[in-house]
Image: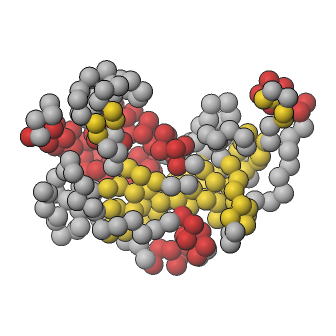
Amino acid sequence: MSEENETGFLEEPTILSVGRYMELVVKLKFLDDAIIRSNDPEEVLTFRYKELGNRFIIPWRKVKGKLRRLVMEKQRGLEIEADCHLKDDLCMHCPSCFLFGGTGETSSAKVSYNILARVFGETFISTTEVGEIQPYTANAVDEKTLTTGQALMNIVTVPAETEFLGVVTLRDPTPEMAAIIVDNLKRLSRLGARSVEWGRVKTEILGYRLSDREELSAYELVEREEEEEIKLGLTGIEKQKLPKVEEAYRNLDIQVKELLKKEKLI
Ligand SMILES: [Zn+2]
Protein backbone atom coordinates (compact mmCIF):
# COMPACT_ATOMS: atom_id res chain seq x y z
CA MET A 1 0.00 0.00 0.00
CA SER A 2 1.16 3.44 -0.87
CA GLU A 3 2.28 5.82 1.84
CA GLU A 4 0.54 9.10 2.32
CA ASN A 5 2.71 12.14 2.38
CA GLU A 6 2.11 15.10 4.70
CA THR A 7 -0.17 16.75 2.16
CA GLY A 8 -2.65 13.88 2.32
CA PHE A 9 -1.86 12.73 -1.19
CA LEU A 10 -0.60 9.23 -1.87
CA GLU A 11 3.06 8.91 -2.87
CA GLU A 12 2.37 6.32 -5.54
CA PRO A 13 -0.69 5.24 -7.52
CA THR A 14 -2.43 2.12 -6.25
CA ILE A 15 -4.47 -0.60 -7.94
CA LEU A 16 -6.83 -1.17 -5.05
CA SER A 17 -8.55 1.79 -3.52
CA VAL A 18 -7.30 3.05 -0.19
CA GLY A 19 -10.42 5.17 0.13
CA ARG A 20 -8.97 8.65 -0.19
CA TYR A 21 -10.89 11.25 -2.11
CA MET A 22 -9.87 14.61 -3.47
CA GLU A 23 -13.05 16.56 -4.11
CA LEU A 24 -12.59 19.56 -6.36
CA VAL A 25 -15.31 22.19 -6.38
CA VAL A 26 -15.56 23.46 -9.93
CA LYS A 27 -17.38 26.49 -11.24
CA LEU A 28 -18.30 26.62 -14.91
CA LYS A 29 -19.44 29.90 -16.37
CA PHE A 30 -20.99 30.21 -19.81
CA LEU A 31 -19.47 33.11 -21.71
CA ASP A 32 -21.93 32.89 -24.60
CA ASP A 33 -25.61 32.13 -24.84
CA ALA A 34 -26.02 28.42 -25.36
CA ILE A 35 -28.91 26.99 -27.29
CA ILE A 36 -29.75 23.53 -26.14
CA ARG A 37 -32.11 20.92 -27.45
CA SER A 38 -33.61 19.91 -24.19
CA ASN A 39 -34.77 16.38 -24.96
CA ASP A 40 -31.31 15.08 -25.72
CA PRO A 41 -29.89 13.51 -22.57
CA GLU A 42 -26.40 14.47 -23.71
CA GLU A 43 -27.11 18.16 -23.48
CA VAL A 44 -27.75 20.62 -20.72
CA LEU A 45 -31.19 20.07 -19.33
CA THR A 46 -33.31 21.68 -16.75
CA PHE A 47 -34.40 20.00 -13.58
CA ARG A 48 -36.85 21.04 -10.94
CA TYR A 49 -35.43 20.58 -7.47
CA LYS A 50 -37.78 20.72 -4.53
CA GLU A 51 -35.75 23.30 -2.61
CA LEU A 52 -33.79 24.98 -5.40
CA GLY A 53 -36.53 25.43 -7.97
CA ASN A 54 -35.97 24.97 -11.67
CA ARG A 55 -32.27 24.84 -12.57
CA PHE A 56 -30.13 24.23 -15.61
CA ILE A 57 -28.06 21.10 -15.21
CA ILE A 58 -25.11 19.64 -17.08
CA PRO A 59 -24.90 15.86 -16.84
CA TRP A 60 -21.53 14.65 -15.51
CA ARG A 61 -21.11 12.43 -18.57
CA LYS A 62 -20.87 15.58 -20.63
CA VAL A 63 -18.15 17.21 -18.54
CA LYS A 64 -16.29 13.94 -18.12
CA GLY A 65 -16.29 13.27 -21.86
CA LYS A 66 -14.74 16.63 -22.55
CA LEU A 67 -12.25 16.34 -19.69
CA ARG A 68 -11.13 12.93 -20.83
CA ARG A 69 -10.58 14.16 -24.37
CA LEU A 70 -8.50 17.05 -23.06
CA VAL A 71 -6.40 14.75 -20.86
CA MET A 72 -5.73 12.45 -23.84
CA GLU A 73 -5.01 15.32 -26.20
CA LYS A 74 -2.40 16.78 -23.87
CA GLN A 75 -0.89 13.33 -23.35
CA ARG A 76 -0.63 12.84 -27.10
CA GLY A 77 1.09 16.21 -27.35
CA LEU A 78 3.73 14.87 -24.97
CA GLU A 79 4.07 11.76 -27.15
CA ILE A 80 3.00 9.41 -24.40
CA GLU A 81 1.03 6.47 -25.85
CA ALA A 82 -0.05 8.61 -28.79
CA ASP A 83 -2.02 5.68 -30.22
CA CYS A 84 -4.31 5.46 -27.22
CA HIS A 85 -7.78 6.44 -28.40
CA LEU A 86 -11.25 6.39 -27.00
CA LYS A 87 -13.78 3.64 -27.68
CA ASP A 88 -12.03 0.43 -28.66
CA ASP A 89 -8.50 1.68 -28.92
CA LEU A 90 -7.50 2.26 -25.32
CA CYS A 91 -3.92 1.18 -24.59
CA MET A 92 -4.80 0.28 -20.98
CA HIS A 93 -1.43 1.36 -19.56
CA CYS A 94 -1.18 5.13 -19.85
CA PRO A 95 -2.04 8.01 -17.51
CA SER A 96 -5.38 8.66 -19.26
CA CYS A 97 -6.48 5.03 -19.07
CA PHE A 98 -5.40 4.88 -15.44
CA LEU A 99 -7.42 7.99 -14.56
CA PHE A 100 -10.56 7.31 -16.58
CA GLY A 101 -10.59 3.54 -16.66
CA GLY A 102 -11.14 1.00 -19.40
CA THR A 103 -12.27 -2.50 -20.17
CA GLY A 104 -9.40 -4.74 -21.28
CA GLU A 105 -11.50 -7.19 -23.23
CA THR A 106 -13.04 -4.64 -25.55
CA SER A 107 -9.90 -2.58 -26.06
CA SER A 108 -7.62 -3.29 -28.96
CA ALA A 109 -4.89 -3.83 -26.34
CA LYS A 110 -6.62 -7.18 -25.64
CA VAL A 111 -5.58 -7.43 -22.03
CA SER A 112 -7.29 -9.48 -19.36
CA TYR A 113 -7.62 -6.72 -16.78
CA ASN A 114 -9.95 -3.77 -16.39
CA ILE A 115 -9.06 -0.39 -14.96
CA LEU A 116 -11.56 1.26 -12.68
CA ALA A 117 -12.09 4.95 -13.19
CA ARG A 118 -10.48 7.20 -10.61
CA VAL A 119 -12.24 10.35 -11.75
CA PHE A 120 -15.86 10.74 -10.72
CA GLY A 121 -18.39 13.49 -10.77
CA GLU A 122 -22.00 14.35 -10.58
CA THR A 123 -24.45 16.66 -12.25
CA PHE A 124 -23.45 20.34 -12.42
CA ILE A 125 -26.26 22.64 -11.23
CA SER A 126 -26.80 26.28 -12.17
CA THR A 127 -26.47 28.77 -9.33
CA THR A 128 -29.48 30.69 -10.57
CA GLU A 129 -32.98 29.57 -11.41
CA VAL A 130 -34.10 29.10 -14.96
CA GLY A 131 -36.08 32.03 -16.24
CA GLU A 132 -39.03 31.58 -18.51
CA ILE A 133 -38.17 29.14 -21.25
CA GLN A 134 -38.82 30.55 -24.70
CA PRO A 135 -39.30 27.69 -27.12
CA TYR A 136 -37.84 28.48 -30.51
CA THR A 137 -40.25 28.75 -33.37
CA ALA A 138 -39.97 25.98 -35.90
CA ASN A 139 -39.05 28.17 -38.81
CA ALA A 140 -36.17 29.73 -36.89
CA VAL A 141 -34.26 26.47 -36.89
CA ASP A 142 -33.73 23.69 -39.40
CA GLU A 143 -36.81 21.44 -39.47
CA LYS A 144 -34.70 18.29 -39.48
CA THR A 145 -32.99 19.09 -36.21
CA LEU A 146 -36.26 20.10 -34.65
CA THR A 147 -38.31 17.02 -35.18
CA THR A 148 -38.28 13.58 -33.66
CA GLY A 149 -41.06 11.69 -35.33
CA GLN A 150 -43.96 14.06 -35.06
CA ALA A 151 -42.96 15.93 -31.94
CA LEU A 152 -41.13 19.18 -31.79
CA MET A 153 -38.18 19.36 -29.50
CA ASN A 154 -37.91 21.90 -26.78
CA ILE A 155 -35.13 24.31 -27.35
CA VAL A 156 -33.75 26.08 -24.34
CA THR A 157 -31.41 29.03 -24.15
CA VAL A 158 -28.92 29.14 -21.34
CA PRO A 159 -27.97 32.80 -21.05
CA ALA A 160 -24.36 33.92 -21.09
CA GLU A 161 -22.97 34.45 -17.57
CA THR A 162 -24.92 31.48 -16.19
CA GLU A 163 -22.74 29.74 -13.62
CA PHE A 164 -22.77 26.10 -12.62
CA LEU A 165 -21.28 24.35 -9.63
CA GLY A 166 -20.12 20.76 -9.58
CA VAL A 167 -17.83 18.43 -7.69
CA VAL A 168 -15.15 16.44 -9.48
CA THR A 169 -13.70 13.67 -7.36
CA LEU A 170 -10.32 12.04 -7.79
CA ARG A 171 -9.97 8.75 -5.92
CA ASP A 172 -6.65 7.81 -4.30
CA PRO A 173 -4.89 10.88 -5.65
CA THR A 174 -1.15 11.28 -6.06
CA PRO A 175 0.29 14.75 -6.74
CA GLU A 176 0.79 13.68 -10.38
CA MET A 177 -2.83 12.58 -10.82
CA ALA A 178 -4.06 15.78 -9.18
CA ALA A 179 -1.80 17.95 -11.35
CA ILE A 180 -3.17 16.37 -14.54
CA ILE A 181 -6.82 16.76 -13.54
CA VAL A 182 -6.36 20.31 -12.25
CA ASP A 183 -4.52 21.41 -15.39
CA ASN A 184 -7.07 19.93 -17.75
CA LEU A 185 -10.08 21.16 -15.78
CA LYS A 186 -8.67 24.65 -16.17
CA ARG A 187 -8.27 24.10 -19.90
CA LEU A 188 -11.93 23.19 -20.24
CA SER A 189 -12.93 26.25 -22.18
CA ARG A 190 -15.62 24.97 -24.46
CA LEU A 191 -18.43 22.49 -24.05
CA GLY A 192 -19.38 21.04 -27.37
CA ALA A 193 -22.30 19.02 -28.50
CA ARG A 194 -23.03 16.90 -31.51
CA SER A 195 -25.33 19.33 -33.21
CA VAL A 196 -25.10 22.55 -31.25
CA GLU A 197 -22.15 24.73 -30.53
CA TRP A 198 -22.52 25.79 -26.95
CA GLY A 199 -19.78 28.28 -27.04
CA ARG A 200 -17.15 29.18 -24.56
CA VAL A 201 -17.05 28.43 -20.88
CA LYS A 202 -14.72 29.58 -18.16
CA THR A 203 -13.64 27.08 -15.54
CA GLU A 204 -12.54 27.94 -12.07
CA ILE A 205 -11.55 25.58 -9.27
CA LEU A 206 -12.90 27.11 -6.07
CA GLY A 207 -10.86 24.75 -3.93
CA TYR A 208 -10.66 21.14 -2.85
CA ARG A 209 -11.08 18.89 0.12
CA LEU A 210 -9.22 15.67 0.90
CA SER A 211 -11.18 13.14 2.86
CA ASP A 212 -11.69 9.44 3.46
CA ARG A 213 -15.17 9.70 2.02
CA GLU A 214 -17.13 11.72 -0.49
CA GLU A 215 -18.63 14.63 1.40
CA LEU A 216 -19.46 17.41 -1.01
CA SER A 217 -22.41 17.66 -3.35
CA ALA A 218 -23.29 20.25 -5.96
CA TYR A 219 -26.80 20.44 -4.52
CA GLU A 220 -25.57 21.54 -1.10
CA LEU A 221 -23.04 23.95 -2.59
CA VAL A 222 -25.69 25.63 -4.72
CA GLU A 223 -27.95 25.85 -1.67
CA ARG A 224 -25.24 27.75 0.20
CA GLU A 225 -25.25 30.46 -2.45
CA GLU A 226 -22.34 32.57 -1.22
CA GLU A 227 -19.12 31.68 -2.96
CA GLU A 228 -17.02 32.94 -0.05
CA GLU A 229 -18.88 30.63 2.27
CA ILE A 230 -18.24 27.70 -0.03
CA LYS A 231 -14.54 28.51 -0.19
CA LEU A 232 -14.27 28.56 3.60
CA GLY A 233 -14.52 24.81 3.83
CA LEU A 234 -11.98 24.22 1.08
CA THR A 235 -8.25 24.38 0.51
CA GLY A 236 -7.17 26.63 -2.33
CA ILE A 237 -5.61 24.65 -5.15
CA GLU A 238 -2.73 27.14 -5.35
CA LYS A 239 -1.79 26.19 -1.77
CA GLN A 240 -0.88 22.73 -2.97
CA LYS A 241 2.51 22.47 -4.63
CA LEU A 242 1.62 20.19 -7.48
CA PRO A 243 4.23 19.08 -10.02
CA LYS A 244 4.31 20.70 -13.45
CA VAL A 245 1.78 19.00 -15.67
CA GLU A 246 4.31 17.70 -18.24
CA GLU A 247 6.38 16.19 -15.46
CA ALA A 248 3.23 14.76 -13.90
CA TYR A 249 2.27 12.95 -17.13
CA ARG A 250 5.78 11.52 -17.56
CA ASN A 251 6.05 10.34 -13.96
CA LEU A 252 2.56 8.89 -13.84
CA ASP A 253 3.22 7.07 -17.10
CA ILE A 254 6.27 5.38 -15.56
CA GLN A 255 4.46 4.67 -12.29
CA VAL A 256 1.42 3.13 -13.97
CA LYS A 257 3.55 0.81 -16.10
CA GLU A 258 5.63 -0.23 -13.07
CA LEU A 259 2.49 -0.84 -11.06
CA LEU A 260 0.91 -3.02 -13.75
CA LYS A 261 4.16 -5.00 -14.07
CA LYS A 262 4.40 -5.46 -10.33
CA GLU A 263 0.86 -6.80 -10.35
CA LYS A 264 1.90 -9.04 -13.26
CA LEU A 265 -0.80 -7.57 -15.44
CA ILE A 266 1.57 -6.59 -18.24
ZN1 LIG B 1 -4.25 4.57 -22.71
**Residue 22 lies in what quarter of the image?**
bottom left
Residue drawn at x 41%, y 52% is: 120
Rendered view: 120 above or below 22: above
Quadrant position of residue 114: top left
Along the horizontal axis of the image, is 64 left or right of 108?
right
Q: Residue at x 60, y 50 (%)?
A: 58
Horizontal arrangement in the rendering, residue 190 relative to residue 67 (left or right): right
Image x and y of residue 248, in percent: 24, 46
At a point 84% along the width and 26% down the height, the residue shown is 143
Where 59 sits versus 232, above or below? above
State how the image is colored.
Answer: secondary structure
The residue under the point 33% across, 62% down is: 21
Quadrant location of the C terminus in the rendered image:
top left
Front in this rendered view, residue 117 or 65? 117
User: Does residue 260 sit above or below 6 in this rendering?
Assistant: above
Locate residue 155 relative to residue 67 in the image: left or right: right
Estimate the x, y position of residue 66 in percent, counting from the top left: 49, 40
Please give the count of numbered marks on the rendered protein: 0
User: Residue 265, position in %: x, y?
Assistant: 15, 34
Is residue 84 visible in this depiction of the protein?
no
Query: From where the camera sits, is residue 232 visible?
Result: yes
Quadrant that contains the N terminus = bottom left
Where does residue 203 sit, x and y in percent of width and height? 52, 54
